[in-house]
Image: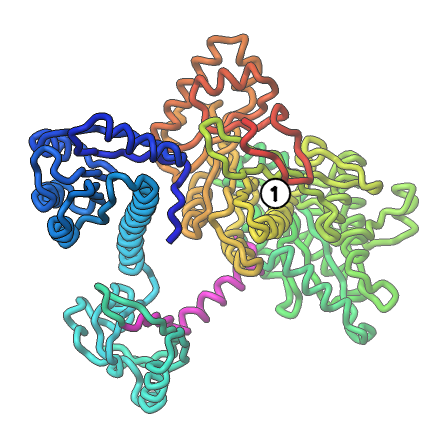
């Protein structure tokens, strides 16, 4: 047995001995081995009883005969007051062996000769180590019981159908299982054979499966037809795994209705390809379909025209009639285009107020009359928006997919440039793309061959810089030309776990970093933030998985933009990403800006609740600038808030700021939420933040953002 003591613990001894000198000898001998000993010497029975009733010692040393108490009587007192506390009996040379044997039978851990101090040292070390192991075991058992209770709660509240069987008979089932098979209470199926839930045609194969299941301790799966209480048969996926209830072995079974999975897959596929506002195909679906078409080697017989349709002066319309009415306008235009479009053509919503039609009207004599038809019906339609009636117009650009012009990027950019030419003429007109005209109009090559998605989903950029940044972003998304850097988030309260904020840098043509302040606003205007979110999340998780595989307990704070909050497919994509990369949600803290959460409360709440279900944590960034913060903290399951940097700027010189920060921090922590101070630049601020009670800090005082993840969290 390993008798090495744990260095971070001291031993509390209760010593029953009439001689102070002998007691000091024992204690000195133990301390000479490196033990940290605290002791209380007693010499009477009443004092022993009082001491045991007052506090539990780690160990009791009893000198045989001390206080006129026999070994057997001493053990009786110790067992009645502190059963389980190790008792070591020290005996003089003249001691008769029989009382010692009786004490051992009563539970004494060992007997040691008064003159054998080496033996005493070994026994005390051994018993203390054993005591610590037993205490640890008790804690583990308590945690196991708590975990089992949580598991039971999860099973009971799970949407999955879960049941437990023993020898083919039900002993427990959750509500999901009862609902699946049409039962109300557990009493309805308790004692029933599981065979009653299997469709008759699968009885033989199921019996064979159960026999094979008994011979293995590992989980197994089975596809089978199940049958509900009303006789309805459905295809199901069954998962079997060994389990126990109240310590008795049994088998856990999880049943999933595959018809529901198929329905869910169809809904997910629909979300992935459909614009939720208009019901049209979305931008991504069009680009994927266009890529498939342009990859066709025999394109000679499958030529297409692409109509790029944009509502004129849409930003002015939105400012005049409001967001709700302008959204209604978008829907009505979508309905008009749907009615005007052939079923064989592909109609998609390409941007905020931009639509694209890909059709086989590949000749000028077909494509241009179609464009004129679309232009005229939109111009002639009177749109009723609440109390307003408006008559918007549109600009249309046309490009043609031919054997000579068969690149999807070029096709979109040509149609876009033709549309811009139409808008440049005042709008309400269509142009077919002509390279010579574009050259004369813009004085250079207008084609953007770097990316299929370099076009804005809102207004075309007014500056060449925004166009350049948009091209760089599209290129970075396609060719992994972003760079992730990491900044440590350090605890002021002794937490040594490794937390890092993930920051994004865009690389230009020379691999020079472009900081977020120089490209994020462009990305928002170009509606590219949702794509950037996904790139950052995926690559952050890849790095996080590597860190975890190397034994680091790293957690990342990863941003989700306003576009990500509004993206209804983001949550499912994150789940897929975690599964694909073998990562865990508990490793990630997703952070959202407070203003974005307030502006999109319902979408944010739905996303946050979904992320919490996969054990991700949530941080609110740029917190503390708006009133009524408590409402947000009260109604959202938040784990961290990151205080806006303006709250810490000039903190040391402003008592008013210190008082404001202290009040915000008290409010945050009253909801059991941890606070993070941003922009910490100096040691003086550090001292103030520690005094205020801030939990974590982030800033250049610790480390500037770096590609390496090597910060020593014990330094602060």
Q: Nearer the viewer, residue 103 or 242?
A: 103
Image x and y of residue 595, in percent: 50, 31
Quarter of the picture containing the N terminus is bottom left
Please count the marks in the image: 1
Q: Residue at x 41, y 23 (%)?
A: 665
In the rendered image, which residue does mark 1 sit on? 391
Q: Residue at x 85, y 69 (%)?
A: 403
Q: Nearer the viewer, residue 98 or 474?
A: 98
Image x and y of residue 587, in percent: 50, 47
Residue 442: quadrant of the picture? top right
Image x and y of residue 177, in percent: 28, 68
Q: Is residue 225 visible?
A: no
Q: Nearer the viewer, residue 336 or 1?
A: 1
Quarter of the picture containing the C terminus is top right
Position of 711 relative to 451 (above/below): above
Residue 467: quadrant of the picture? top right
Taking the magenta stretch, the answer to whether it contains residue 274 is yes
Q: Residue at x 78, y 56 (%)?
A: 409
Q: Residues within 10 Å of mark 1 (few under 14, many from 20)?
A: few
- Compared across the picture, whether 558 is left or right of 182 comes to right
Q: Residue at x 13, y 48 (%)?
A: 96
Position of 482 relative to 164 (above/below): above
> Which stretch appears magenta?
250-276
Image x and y of residue 390, in percent: 58, 40
Q: Secondary structure at mark 1?
A: loop
């Amino acid at each position: 047995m390993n008798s090495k003591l744990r260095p971070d613990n001291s031993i509390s001894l209760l010593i029953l001995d009439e001689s102070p000198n002998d007691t000091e000898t024992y204690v000195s001998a133990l301390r000479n081995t490196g033990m940290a000993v605290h002791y209380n010497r007693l010499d009477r029975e009443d004092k022993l009883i009082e001491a045991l009733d007052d506090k539990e010692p780690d160990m009791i040393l009893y000198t045989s005969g001390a206080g006129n108490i026999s070994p057997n009587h001493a053990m009786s007192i110790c067992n009645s007051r502190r059963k389980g506390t190790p008792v070591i009996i020290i005996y003089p040379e003249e001691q008769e062996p029989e009382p010692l044997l009786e004490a051992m039978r009563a539970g004494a851990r060992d007997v040691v000769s008064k003159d054998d101090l080496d033996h005493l040292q070994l026994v005390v070390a051994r018993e203390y180590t054993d005591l610590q192991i037993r205490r640890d075991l008790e804690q583990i058992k308590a945690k196991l019981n708590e975990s089992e209770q949580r598991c039971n709660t999860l099973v009971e509240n799970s949407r999955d159908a879960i049941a437990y069987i023993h020898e083919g008979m039900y002993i427990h089932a959750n509500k999901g299982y009862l609902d699946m098979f049409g039962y109300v209470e557990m009493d309805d199926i308790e004692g029933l054979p599981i065979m009653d839930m299997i469709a008759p045609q699968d009885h033989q194969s199921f019996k064979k499966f159960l026999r094979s299941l008994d011979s293995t301790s590992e989980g197994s799966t089975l596809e089978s037809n199940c049958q509900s209480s009303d006789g309805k048969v459905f295809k199901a996926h069954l998962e079997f795994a060994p389990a126990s209830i109240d310590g008795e072995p049994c088998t856990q079974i999880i049943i999933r209705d595959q018809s529901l999975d198929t329905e869910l897959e169809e809904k997910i596929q629909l979300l992935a390809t459909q614009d939720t506002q208009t019901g049209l195909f979305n931008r991504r679906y069009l680009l994927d379909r266009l890529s498939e078409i342009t990859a066709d080697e025999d394109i000679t017989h499958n030529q297409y025209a692409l109509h790029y349709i944009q509502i004129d002066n849409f930003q002015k319309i939105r400012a005049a009639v409001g967001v709700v009415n302008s959204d209604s306008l978008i829907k009505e235009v979508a309905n008009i285009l749907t009615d005007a479009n052939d079923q064989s053509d592909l109609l998609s919503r390409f941007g905020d107020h931009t639509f694209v039609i890909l059709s086989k009207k590949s000749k000028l004599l077909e494509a241009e009359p179609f464009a004129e038809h679309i232009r005229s019906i939109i111009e002639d339609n009177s749109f009723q928006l609440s109390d307003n009636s408006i008559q918007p117009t549109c600009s249309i650009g046309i490009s043609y997919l031919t054997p000579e012009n068969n690149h999807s990027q070029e096709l979109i950019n040509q149609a876009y440039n033709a549309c811009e030419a139409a808008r440049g003429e005042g709008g309400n007109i269509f142009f077919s793309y002509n390279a010579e005209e574009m050259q004369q109009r813009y004085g250079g090559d207008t084609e953007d061959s770097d990316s299929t998605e370099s076009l804005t989903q809102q207004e075309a950029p007014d500056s060449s810089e925004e166009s350049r940044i948009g091209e760089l972003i599209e290129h970075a998304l396609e060719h992994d030309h972003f760079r992730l850097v990491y900044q440590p988030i350090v605890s002021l309260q002794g937490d040594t776990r490794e937390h890092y904020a993930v920051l994004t840098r865009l690389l230009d043509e020379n691999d020079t970093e472009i900081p977020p302040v120089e490209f994020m606003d462009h990305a928002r205007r170009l509606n590219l933030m949702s794509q950037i979110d996904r790139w950052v999340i995926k690559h952050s998780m890849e790095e996080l998985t590597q860190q975890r595989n190397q034994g680091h307990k790293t957690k990342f704070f990863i941003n989700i933009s306003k576009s990500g909050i509004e993206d209804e497919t983001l949550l499912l994509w994150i789940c897929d990403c975690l599964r694909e990369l073998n990562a865990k949600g508990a490793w990630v803290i997703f952070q959202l800006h407070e203003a974005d959460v307030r502006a999109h409360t319902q979408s944010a709440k739905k996303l946050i609740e979904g992320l919490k279900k996969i054990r991700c944590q949530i941080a609110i960034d740029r917190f503390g600038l708006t009133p009524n913060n408590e409402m947000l903290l009260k109604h959202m399951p938040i784990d961290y808030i990151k205080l806006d940097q303006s709250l810490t700027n000039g903190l040391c010189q402003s008592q008013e700021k210190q008082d404001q920060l202290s009040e915000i921090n008290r409010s945050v922590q009253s909801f059991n939420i941890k606070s993070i101070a941003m922009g910490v630049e100096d040691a003086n601020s550090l001292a103030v933040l520690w005094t205020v009670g801030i939990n974590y800090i982030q800033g250049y005082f610790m480390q500037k953002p770096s590609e390496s993840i090597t910060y020593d969290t014990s330094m602060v």
